[in-house]
Image: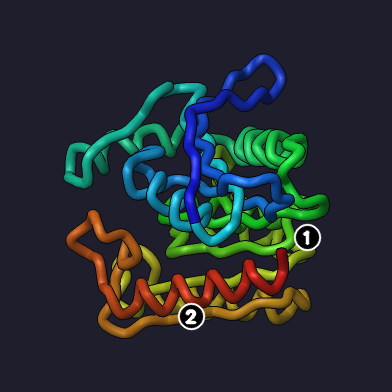
Amino acid sequence: MTIQTQAVQVLNGDLKIEAYLAEPTGDGPFPAVVVIQEVFGVNAHIRDVCDRLARSNYITLAPAIYQRNAPGFEVSYNEAGLKEGRKYKEMTDAEELLGDVGAAIAFLQSKPNVKPGGVGTIGFCFGGHVVYLAATLPEVKATASFYGAGITTMTPGAGEPPTLTRTRQIGGELYGFFGNEDQLIPNGQVDEIEAALKANGVDHKIFRYDDAGHGFFCDGRSAYVEAAAKDAWMQVQELFGRCL
């Protein structure tokens, strides 16, 4: 499948959000997916995820969720980059993030080659938390949340109550992906997420991978675990293929 990519701007009120768009060539219509970055920005890994989905017949958009405080933000996978990325993560706000994801969804739904109806989301690291939050938006039919830290303990910008308390607002289906060796997300927190999804009647599956830690899906990080990444990608394809 041949694809085309470009840098675009997504409008959320007066805010112009830089974003990466990848789409199959052809008239479509194609289902749409919003891709949410790690703390490292809309970098080569996030663009690659967009491209991979586009080659599977999805139109994908990765908005820069640090646009307000750090336009053009993209850093390396090292301690300095992590420190910088976390600094801007602390400046985000849940309602602003929901507005930005909503604007990204509206941008996609306005395109003539996008299939009418709901969209999917996929996010990694902090983006995994953001897409869990955004799963509460009515347009989101399918969510793939990868190792989103803090879901059980905080919500961006406000701290308390944690994002987990919004689980009852999720209307679509959610898959969560976690490494059993993740030092940022204790297994007990994964248990809490799974219990909340079950208690609130959310269609879901939680995937836990042995010998995998935080960032296991990203082949640009030392934490990459090929077997876990391949299985998780297969599950994402199944989720989006069935729901979108």
Question: Mark 2 to mark 1: distance in Å?
Answer: 22 Å
Residue sitting at 62 percent across and 19 percent down? 15
* The C terminus - image quarter: bottom right
Residue 189 seen in the current view: no
Q: Residue 88 in the image: x percent, y percent?
A: 40, 32
Which residue is labeled 1 in the image? 169
Query: Would you say the residues marked 2 and 1 are in contact, meaning their CB atoms lie under 8 Å apart?
Result: no
Quadrant hosting residue 211? bottom left
Q: Residue 23 in the image: x percent, y percent?
A: 56, 45
**Kind of residue indicated by mark 1:** Gln
Q: Nearer the viewer, residue 50 or 207?
A: 50
Residue sitting at 54 percent across and 26 percent down? 8
Label 1: how many residues lie within 10 Å, few (<14), some (14-19) or many (20+)?
some
- Location of residue 241 with respect to 19 vertically, above or below: below
| Nearer to us: label 2 or label 1 | 2
Quadrant hosting residue 93? top right
Which residue is labeled 2 in the image? 207
Label 2 sits on a secondary structure element that is strand
Q: Earlier in the sequence, mark 2 or mark 1?
A: 1
**Kind of residue indicated by mark 2:** Phe
Q: Is residue 129 left or right of residue 118?
A: left
Q: Residue 102 in the image: x percent, y percent?
A: 71, 39
Q: Nearer the viewer, residue 1 or 152?
A: 1
Residue sitting at 38 percent across and 50 percent down? 48
Q: How many marks?
A: 2
Q: Residue 69 in the image: x percent, y percent?
A: 45, 22
Label 1 sits on a secondary structure element that is helix
Residue sitting at 54 percent across and 57 percent down? 122
- Location of residue 8 with respect to 3 vertically, above or below: above
